[in-house]
Image (tube, helix red, strand yellow):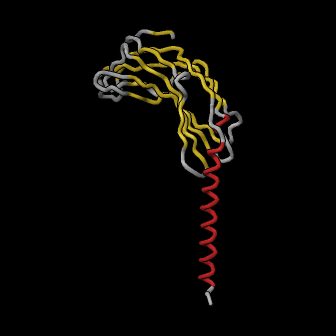
Amino acid sequence: MHSSLVRLQQVFGFLTTVSFALGTLIALTSYLYPMTPTASIKVRDIAVVKRRSGGYYSTRQNEYAKIKFDLNADFDSLYNWNTKQIYVWISTSYGGDRYPTNEMIIWDKIIDKTALSKKITLKNEPAKYNVHDITGAYANRNATLKLSWNVQPHVGVLMWGSASDSVTESFMWPSEKARAAV
């Protein structure tokens, strides 16, 4: 009849098929849960300062923006039994003459399933990363802060989302060394 090696291959083949079917079922059932997080973002303070771009040999002066913001967000609805972690970030986007579309991440956080609270409340939080434009100048450009997230499941594809237009905050970059209380 069959040798024990052939029987072992059939058992592992069956287990692989069952595991694949179970993984597919798990991934599909995560779409049944509504994903409706709530958030609000508000720009607190914006300042543009001129400084060296870094490095010992660089003498070029560039404009850097300093942003402080408030964030209230509740990501409870993004968590279900298939969620491993959520990557949350705030990006700023603005236009320019040479480069019409510019977007950069100014703050981010990873919320894993072991976190006690899936809510984020930040008051007067400074940007986590340097805000620097490739042209070196920000003055009088319109910009927008936007909250986005990426749900990373145990099984299945990544799910991306962003805050609605009512949650985004628009502002204008001030002139150099000026402070704009928004």
Q: Is residue 127 above or below residue 20?
A: above
Q: Position of residue 5 (x, y in %)?
A: 60, 82
Q: Nearer the viewer, residue 105 or 176?
A: 105
- Apparent side of residue 148 relative to residue 10 in the rendered image (left or right): left
- What's the residue at 54%, 27% (across, down)? 164
Q: Quadrant of residue 87?
A: top right
Task: Identify the residue at the far right of this view.
Answer: 116
In this picture, is 65 found above or below 117? above
* Along the line of sight, the residue nearer the viewer: 81 or 27: 27
Q: Quadrant of the N terminus?
A: bottom right
Residue drawn where x is 62% and y is 24% of the image? 72
Determine which quarter of the picture holds residue 115. Answer: top right
Q: Nearer the viewer, residue 33 or 74?
A: 33
Looking at the picture, how far across and down is residue 137, in whole percent?
33, 18
Residue visible at 42% across and 25% down in the picture: 93
Relative side of 116 to 131, left or right: right
